[in-house]
Amino acid sequence: MNCSASSAPFCQKPHLAKLASWFATSLVLGLVFCLFSGQATAQAPKEYLEASAPRPQTKVVTLTYTNPFDRSAAEALLDLPPKLKGPTPLIISPHGANWTPEMNRATWTGVADEFTVMILYPRSQGKVAPGVSLGSARQIANLEAALAEVRRRYPVDENRIYASGISQGGIETLMLVGKHPQLFAAALAINPIADFVTMHEDSTQFRALLDLDIGGTPDAARAEYYLRSPFLYARELATVPLILYWAENDEIIPQGEKHQGGMLAKMIRYFQPRSFEEVRHAQGHGYPFFRLDPESKKIATFPRGPFLESLKKMLSYSLPRRGPRPAQK
């Protein structure tokens, strides 16, 4: 600590310096959590979660495993179809920021039963908050480990593994598929951040959170900002059938056309994608599930049709037939 006139008392008493540092950090974290919690409420409103609660008859199991990134204990929920008859398709769905796997299940109500698929919901491992992971290296390792655990325990159809998520879950869907394009038959990413550097520039309300979670401003930690940005994987994403939603009027992610979803779509098209569908819309950050009117604070729930059509299209893709995966001990 530099001993300026204002900090001299703390330099003379190291324990006071530590106390001041702790207090300042706590204050910033408090402000960030208050801000981010408010936005997260807009992303996962109670009314929507209650109205779209998972069906009681859907079988759900809890998986525990180890994240190899730091050897930490990790957990995921797994929806199972009524009967597992041989190799079964698997969807991994990372959840939104400040969501939980339990909340995320509401967006997939009935899908495991009706489409005979397994749906995997890893619990995020965040830095500044458990549910805020924002595509970190630790979180991607968590998702990879969750996938490996399901493939070890259950009869997964290795030709039909998919990824899909909204918001933070959309970011991590793109990151996971971009890192392992050979593993996934298709993906559905809904309203993700594509570039964290421009997100920092365009969104003053989230700068403090990004600084804390990523490790500084873009000037101080530019490499880490880019390593979390899905646009870095545009070439790889072009090799996997992808449906990408983004909002013109996203209340969470500004400058969608210039810096985020619209920009990513242009980059993917540059690489002549195998199959790519861009869903540009003006229904806000929660589409195709819900919308919060910022003035009336009322929740509007969208019909399930658009999401289910996108889901059916994603599930229509399969990798070229390959043999069963060797059993793991």
Image (cartoon, grey):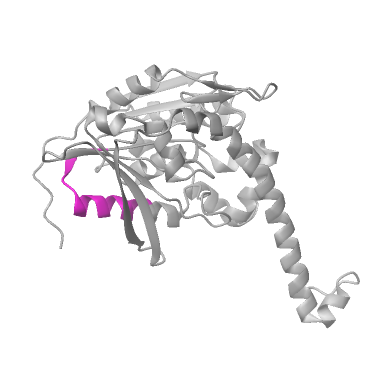
Q: Is residue 191 visible?
A: no
Instruction: Estimate the x, y position of residue 40 in percent, counting from the top left.
Output: 58, 39
- The answer to which quarter of the image holds residue 80 is top left
Q: Which residues are magenta?
A: 143-161
Residue at figure coordinates x 47%, y 48% from the top left: 135
Image point (29%, 50%), residue name: 147
| Vertical side of 98 occupied by 316: above or below | above
Which sits in the foreground, 88 or 61? 61
Q: Position of residue 323 (x, y in %)?
A: 8, 44
Give the side of residue 232 with respect to residue 308, left or right. right
Residue 197 belongs to the span the image colors magenta: no
* Residue placed furthest toward the right: 5
Q: Residue furthest front?
A: 56
Q: Is residue 174 left or right of residue 212?
A: left
Q: Nearer the viewer, residue 188 or 295?
A: 295
Q: In the figure, residue 315 lies in which quadrant?
A: top left
Q: Quadrant of the N terminus?
A: bottom right
The residue depicted at 38 percent of the width and 34 percent of the height is: 54
Q: How many marks?
A: 0
Does 193 sit above or below residue 9?
Answer: above
Percent of width and height locating residue 168: 49, 41
- In the rendered image, the quadrant that contains the C terminus is bottom left
Compared to residue 287, the image places residue 227 above or below, namely below
Asked whether 155 falls inside the magenta stretch, the response is yes
**Residue 215 seen in render:** yes
Residue 85, x across and y down, in percent = 11, 38
